Every structure is written in C-alpha cells, then in structure tokens.
Amino acid sequence: MKKILIALLLTGTFGLSFAQSDYYNDYRRSITDVNWQSVAADLLLSVSQTNQLNSLNDRYRDYDSWNRAYVSQPDRWREDRYYEIERILGREKYTKFKKNYYKGQNPVAVYNRNKNNYKKNKGYKNKEYKMNKKKEHHH
C-alpha cells in the first residue's frame, strides 16, 4: 500500500510540473510569437509605452522567476499579462493589437482554448499576420 501511495504522489508531482512547464511555454510564446517592434510601429506607440511593453516582456526572464509568481495558479499569467498590455496600450490600441495578432479575439481566450494543444495548432496566432507584414515591406 505504501508503494502505491508513493507512486501516486510522484505521478501527481511530475504531472503538476509538466503542466506548469506547459503554462510557462505558453507564456514564453506570448512574448516570442509577437514582433514587438512591429507592434510599436504599427500602433504608433510612444517611447514610454514601448518601454513599458519591453519591461513587461522582461518581467520573468526564466522559469524559476515565473514559477515563483504563478506556482499556485499557473493559468493566471494570461489575465495578468493581457490586462497589463491593455493598460499600457489603452483600449483603442489594444483592440487593434487583438485584431492584428489574435484575429480580434481575446488573447486570454485564445490561450485557454489552445493550452496543452499548441503543438497541433502551431500557426493558431499571428503567423499569417507576420507573413503579410513581410510581404508588405518587400514591395
């Protein structure tokens, strides 16, 4: 009985850490999948707004710092992050940001729908937008 209990505890521990890393990977993709220089240029952001976005993107530089903040609620990063982005951009520019990068959908909903499913849906966000922007710049 003791061995079964230990096995269950270990399975739960490893399962939780795997889930945590999936959430962290989503968090990192929310930063790396977006060309923030293009966002700043497209939305005509002020230097202050651009600096605030860069600071937000640098807030958790590694898994340990992110995990300290979100260990008990790993999915909370979505609400925190996109609330901060909306605060920095303002409602009008945030709406344009969502339209360009998340097809008009709430980014929190996009990540909630695609969590643990990102490998199957690798192009679910802004690759199309990036490709269109690249084509525009080459003409």
Image (tube, helix red, strand yellow):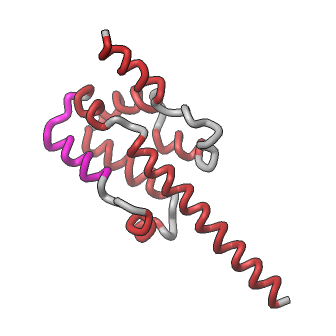
Against 10, is 137 above or below?
Answer: above
Image quadrant occupied by the C terminus: top left
Q: Residue at x 75, y 84 (%)?
A: 6
Q: Nearer the viewer, residue 10 or 50?
A: 10
Residue 106 drawn at (x, y percent): 46, 37
* Residue 76 visible to the viewer: yes
Question: Please, which residue is most extreme toward the left here?
Answer: 47
Q: Residue at x 37, y 15 (%)?
A: 135
* Residue 92 visible to the viewer: no
Against 91, is 74 above or below?
Answer: below
Find out whether residue 47 is within the magenta segment: yes
> Which secondary structure is most common in the magenta stretch?
helix
Q: Residue at x 69, y 77 (%)?
A: 10
Q: Which residues are magenta?
A: 44-57
Find out whether residue 46 is within the magenta segment: yes
Q: Quadrant of residue 59?
A: bottom left
Against 54, is 1 above or below?
Answer: below
Residue 103 drawn at (x, y percent): 47, 27
Residue 78 drawn at (x, y percent): 45, 51
On the picture, is 47 further left or further right than 34?
Answer: left
Question: Please, which residue is most extreme toward the right here?
Answer: 1
On the picture, is 3 further left or further right than 10?
Answer: right
Residue 63 drawn at (x, y percent): 44, 63
